[in-house]
Image (cartoon, rainbow, N blue to C red):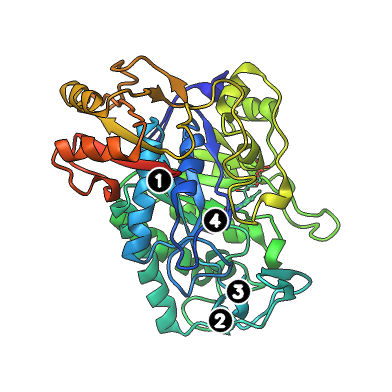
Amino acid sequence: MKLLTPLQLGKLHLRNRVVMAPMTRNRADARGVVGATTVRYYAQRATAGLVITEATNISEEAKGYPMTPGIWSAEQVEAWKAVTSAVHAAGGTIVMQLWHTGRVGHSDVRDGRVPVAPSAIAIEGQQHFTPTGPKPYEVPRALTTDEVRATVDDYERGARNAKAAGFDGVELHGAFGYLPNEFLVDGANQRTDAYGGSVENRARFVLEVMQRLVAVWGDGRVGIRLSPTLAYNGMVDTDPLATFSYLLERLNAMPLAYLHLMRATPDAGRFPSWPRDTIATFGPLFRGALVVNGGYDRDAAEAVVTSGAAHAVSFGAPFVSNPDLVHRLESGAPLATPDRNTFYQGGERGYVDYPALDADPPQAPKGYWLVQATITDPAQFAKYAAAAGPVIASYGGRAIARGDVAEVVEGTVPRRPYFVEFPSHAAARACYRSAGYEDAIALRSGAAHFDVVIVEGTGG
Ligand SMILES: Cc1cc2nc3c(=O)[nH]c(=O)nc-3n(C[C@H](O)[C@H](O)[C@H](O)COP(=O)(O)O)c2cc1C
């Protein structure tokens, strides 16, 4: 299947064209810090050609939903390092989706502050998910011009922090009615400064943000997600073709990794003038690589990449309930149906307990710590393996013989990841201490040849 062939998206190397779509799961803590269960969740899905994280708030002000992660504090960056290390240890590639929810929030989840937006126009006909149930949207506060510029700075900080956290790149969440999308469409943006009015002005915010992201990340590591024909969250534009054609033309001048395009088609009766086929209309306007999304199954995904209309396909809900989605697409195995009740409810259920079809990763006996290490130097591996005592070695969820070379990742320096799961917290600590890593248990990433990730701690 073409879907399973490798792909280069700018500087991002994908081992297949099956992308994990960004999915908010509300499993961070109140400070926007992700924990060990989130590390496990992403590691389970690392066989995707590219993992795109859940939307991640670039600032406190960006936040619109409870228990969503952030990328503005040092503590958040440290926590994300464990996710990127785990995905890399499994041979995966991962980018962070940068988020500002704009007017799609509520004062209940913002310490009493109403959401901010390009203009003081509320979303009509929908309610917001708050800790005390759905509530009507409030009228947002319009950002001042200085605040708009400060928000562009916040995106840059998010991009820098994502780099510090070990990601391979970033994706701007420019879809679904969040802040960048609000600037683009005239139904939500009625500003009279340089960020509103003409198409050029409405696109200015997104283009400034993208320029900053590219300035931080360089060529081929920044993507953008757009949904030109999705009216969700009040995203109504008089002329989406004109608005998004202009935006794409300007994005073509930037060295991006990819465009991530939603194939949503508008309700025909409501928007008769809108393009009917989003991918066919907007895809060819972008000269770089195209990742498409929206209700694709195995056959439709294979067809769209085979036809050349897209380079890769992202899957959302199927990745929730099929951590081994790539393997299932390859074998034609049936897909498990996700439980929508556990999408956003927090906890491990419906998050990390969907089984893979074949051998699950070896589980540490209850009450033990499971520590995963990537060691790139065979001599070092032998040393750690010996120090660890009886080890279970695994790769990408499949058991391998201890000391096997699991994979050589493309690059200037051959990389040989080995995986060591220590049978106890004490064994891991002893091992790392013997190597001079006194604070190994807190260690997220070590010297160039050695990364350590605490995958799970179930006891001491
Ligand atoms: C639980 C859940 C959370 C989502 N959160 C996000 C998000 O944070 N950012 C985003 O761009 N899209 C989000 N989406 C949309 C998905 O990325 C994707 O566009 C959607 O699920 C359609 O793809 P699918 O038909 O393969 O599921 C979410 C979808 C689901 C099911």
Residue holding disc 1: 83
Q: Which mark is residue 137?
A: none
Whichever of labels 2 and 3 marks the residue nearer the N terminus, that label is: 3
**Labels 4 and 1 touching (C-beta < 8 A):** no
The residue to which callout 4 is attached is: 27
Tell me the element at label 2: loop
In front: label 2 or label 3: 3
Q: Secondary structure at mark 3?
A: loop
Instruction: Check disc 4 and give the amino acid type.
Output: Arg
Residue 153 in the image: above or below residue 355: below
The kind of residue on which mark 3 rests is: Arg
Residue, x 38% and y 23% (percent of image)? Answer: 392
Callout 2–callout 4 Cβ contact below 8 Å: no
Q: CA distance from mark 2 to mark 1?
A: 39 Å
Query: What's the mark number on residue 191?
Result: 2
93 sits to left or right of 110 = left
Q: Residues within 10 Å of mark 3 (few under 14, many from 20)?
A: many
Front label number (4 vs 3): 4
According to the picture, the residue beneath numbered tag 3 turns out to be: 103
